[in-house]
Amino acid sequence: MNGLEEPVLSVRNLNKQFGPGCPYCQQTQSTKMIKNYCQVCGTVYACKDVSFEVYPGEVLGIVGESGSGKSTLMQCLYFDQDVTRGEAYISTYQNGERNLFQESAQAKRYIRNHMMGKVYQNPMLGLRMNFSSIGNIAEKLIAAGNRQVGMMEERGTELLNKVNIPVHRRKEAPKNFSGGMQQRVQIAKALSNHPPLLLLDEVTTGLDLSVQASVLDLIKSLQRELGISIVLVSHDLGVIRMLADRTLVMLEGKVIEQGLTDQILEDPQAKYTQQLVHSLL
Ligand SMILES: Nc1ncnc2c1ncn2[C@@H]1O[C@H](COP(=O)(O)OP(=O)(O)OP(=O)(O)O)[C@@H](O)[C@H]1O
Ligand SMILES: [Mg+2]
Ligand SMILES: [Zn+2]
C-alpha cells in the first residue's frame, strides 16, 4: 500500500438490516436496542456503515465477536444477500466506476464468477457434497462460460494439486473427505477463474489445530504465489495475526477500529480490541 495504488475493492457505507425497522430503533440513541437488536420490532442491524478498501495483493483481516456482522458483510459482498444500502466497487469491473450493488442480477453473476471466489465456514454451503471434487471446480468454470471438457479437467487437476488434494482422489465426492480436505476443495474452487479477490469466512474454524495450521499455511503460500487480494474473516485473532496485513475490528455491526495488524496487536485503541488482544496473550 503506497497511496498511489488503486484499491481492488472499495466498500462505502454498507448497511444490512434484517427486519423492517420501526420508529424506536430508527432514533439515534434508542433505548429499545440491545446491542444491534431492536426489542420492539425485532430488527437486527447486522452491518452499519461499514467502509473499507482492499489493496492489490493485500490480506485484510476482519475480526469480531459472534454476531458482529462479519458473515453478513461477506454475504453482501458475494451477493448472497442484498444490502439495505451502500456501495462497493471492484477495480477490474467497469474501471471501478459502477456500484456493484446496483448492477443487474446477470451482471452480479458475472462479477461473482469472474472477480471473486468465496470459501464458506460451512463447506455444505460452498460445495455440492455428492458431486465429484473436480466436478465442483468444473461447476464454477462452467458458470464463467467455459465449455471445453478437456481444458476443465486439466484446470481442475492443476487446482486440486495446488491445494494438496491427491490427484487420484479428484473424482471422489467431498462428502468422503475430511474437514480440512473439504476446505481445500473449496479453496481450489474459489481460485478456479483467477479472481482478483478471495473472500474467506472462518475457513479454519472447527478444524483441529494441526489441520488449521496446514490450511492457513496453504492460504499464505497461495496468496504469495498468486498475489491475490484476500478478505479473511475470523473471530480468532491468532488466525488474523498469522495472515492479515491490515485488520478491521467489528463490534455490533460497526467497524470500531482499523489499521495495520501489527499496530492493532501492539497498541489496540478501542476497549473491545484491548480485551481481544489481552485474551490472546
Ligand atoms: N438471515 C438472517 N435473518 C435474520 N437475522 C440474521 C440473518 N443472518 C444474520 N442475522 C443476524 O445478523 C447478526 C450478524 O450475524 P453474522 O452471521 O453476520 O455474525 P458473525 O459476525 O458472522 O458471527 P459468527 O462469528 O458467530 O459467525 C446476528 O445477530 C444474526 O442473528
Ligand atoms: Mg460468521
Ligand atoms: Zn425497531
Image (cartoon, rainbow, N blue to C red):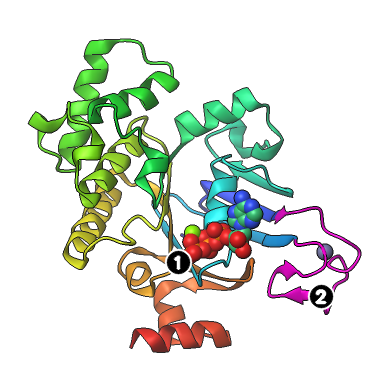
- Quadrant of the image occupied by residue 107: top right
Q: Is residue 256 left or right of residue 113?
A: right
Q: Position of residue 182 (x, y in %)?
A: 26, 44
Q: How far from the left and from the top, in percent, is residue 210?
A: 16, 64
Residues tagged 2 and 1 counted as in contact (Cβ below 8 A): no
The image shows residue 25 at horizontal and vertical percentages of 83, 67
Q: Quadrant of residue 52?
A: bottom right
As drawn, is 156 to the left or to the right of 270? left
Identify the residue at image location x=22%, y=34%: 159
> What are the residue bounds of the magenta stretch?
17-42
Please state which of residues 36 and 220 is positioned toward the viewer in this rendering: 36
At a point 33% along the width and 31% down the height, the residue shown is 192
Q: CA distance from mark 2 to mark 1?
A: 34 Å
**Which quarter of the picture shows residue 78?**
top right
Q: Is the CB of mark 1 within 8 Å of ligand 1? A: no
Q: Amino acid at mark 2?
A: Lys
Residue 220 falls within the magenta-colored stretch: no
Name the residue beneath numbered marker 1.
246
Q: Is residue 172 above or below residue 154?
A: below
Q: Is mark 2 within 8 Å of ligand 3?
A: yes
Q: Main secondary structure of the magenta part?
A: loop
Q: Which mark is residue 32?
A: 2
Name the residue at 55% across, 40% down: 91
Q: Is residue 280 above or below residue 64?
A: below
Query: Can residue 2 be seen?
Result: no
Looking at the rendered structure, the kind of residue marked 1 is: Arg
